[in-house]
Image (spheres, helix red, strand yellow):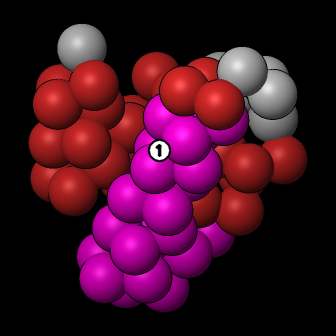
Amino acid sequence: MKLFRFLLALVVPPLGVFMTVGVGPTLVINILLTLLGWLPGSIHALWVVAKREEALNSGTY
């Protein structure tokens, strides 16, 4: 599932963020960044997915 979220974050950034954190301010930010261009949205989505995985692995989330 982790690989799937990373691939979604790369190909369709808002969907990757939605699958990771759900509906919230992070998703809205990602949608706005994606509207500005695919690259900013992808970078943000990859960062969100990576931070979420890091938090889950460390047990702080």
> Label 1: few (<14), some or many (≥20) within 10 Å?
many
Helix, strand or loop at disc 1?
helix
Judge left or right: residue 2 versus residue 55.
left
Provide residue 32's location: percent of width, then percent of height.
Answer: 62, 69
Judge left or right: residue 2 versus residue 34.
left
Quadrant of the rendering where the N terminus is positioned: top left
Instruction: Give the total of numbered labels.
Output: 1
Q: Which residue is mark 1?
A: 49
Q: Is residue 25 visible?
A: yes
Residue displayed at 65% across by 31% down? 58
Quadrant of the rendering where the C terminus is positioned: top right
Q: Quadrant of residue 57?
A: top right
Q: Which residues are magenta?
A: 31-55
Provide residue 48's location: percent of width, then percent of height.
Answer: 56, 52
Residue 57 versus residue 27 in the image, above or below: above
Judge left or right: residue 33 versus residue 14.
right
Which of the pair 48/27 is nearer the observer? 48
Magenta segment: does it hold 49? yes
